[in-house]
């Protein structure tokens, strides 16, 4: 496969012509997260026509479901992502970047008033939801197919058992 620059474009957008072994070629956009906005600014002769149809479908979809979505300013990247786990030893010992934070699980359990029951996490990953919900007094069941996730969860369980039950806060 040969990659050749096709146009002079802004630094955030690179239009390249990818020539495959079978001599069929296609144009692809390799860009920053704002590719659609940047590509709208391109002269029409440089903007592939199919992008207009994709934009129209996306706008139609967004209008149709707009009333179902809301933005919660409390759900910042710092709360949602693994970054918030960096301050908690039980979670930070292995950086599992796909994980979300224990704080997010605690926030959702509190927000929706969940104080009892069983949490099922079908994609347990490093076990954040399992351990955070257990700390909140819920039972937890998780499914994880990746061996690294299974290893992380098992190690945390072994570590928790070795330390004994968590200290109860006095009222």
Image (cartoon, rainbow, N blue to C red):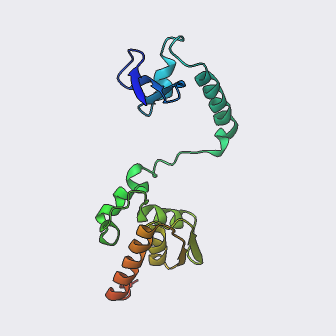
The x and y percentages for residue 36 are 51, 27
Residue 119 position, x and y percent, is 57, 73
User: Depth check: 117 or 161 in front?
Assistant: 161
Q: Position of residue 52 (x, y in %)?
A: 61, 22
- Rendered residue at 53%/17% (across/down): 47
Residue 169 falls in which quadrant of the image?
bottom left
Residue 30 occupies which quadrant of the picture? top left
Q: Taking 24 as reference, is 2 left or right?
A: left
Give the position of the N terminus as an image quadrant.
top left
**Residue found 34% across the figure and 82% down from its top:** 159
Q: Which residue is painted at 60% across and 27% down in the image?
A: 55
Which of the pair 131/149 is nearer the observer? 149
Residue lying at 39% horizontally and 72% vertically, measured from the top left: 152
Q: Nearer the viewer, residue 91 or 132?
A: 91
Position of the C terminus by quadrant: bottom left
Q: Is residue 139 above or below residue 58?
A: below
Relative to 3, does residue 83 appear above or below in the rendering? below
* Outermost residue to the right: 64
Image: 110 above or below 48: below
């Amino acid at each position: 496969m040969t990659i050749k620059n096709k146009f002079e474009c802004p630094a955030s957008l690179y239009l390249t012509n990818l020539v495959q072994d079978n001599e069929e070629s296609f144009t692809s956009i390799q860009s920053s997260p704002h590719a659609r906005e940047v590509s709208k600014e391109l002269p029409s002769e440089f903007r592939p026509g199919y992008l207009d149809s994709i934009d129209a479908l996306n706008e139609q979809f967004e209008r149709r479901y707009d009333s179902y979505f809301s933005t919660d300013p409390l759900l910042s990247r710092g709360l949602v992502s693994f970054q918030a786990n960096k301050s908690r030893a039980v979670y930070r010992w292995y950086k599992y970047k796909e994980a979300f934070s224990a704080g997010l699980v605690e926030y959702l359990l509190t927000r929706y008033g969940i104080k009892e029951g069983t949490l099922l996490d079908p994609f347990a990953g490093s076990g954040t939801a399992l351990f955070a919900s257990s700390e909140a007094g819920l039972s937890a069941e998780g499914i994880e197919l990746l061996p690294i996730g299974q290893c992380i969860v098992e190690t945390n369980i072994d570590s928790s058992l070795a330390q004994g039950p968590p200290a109860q806060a006095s009222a």
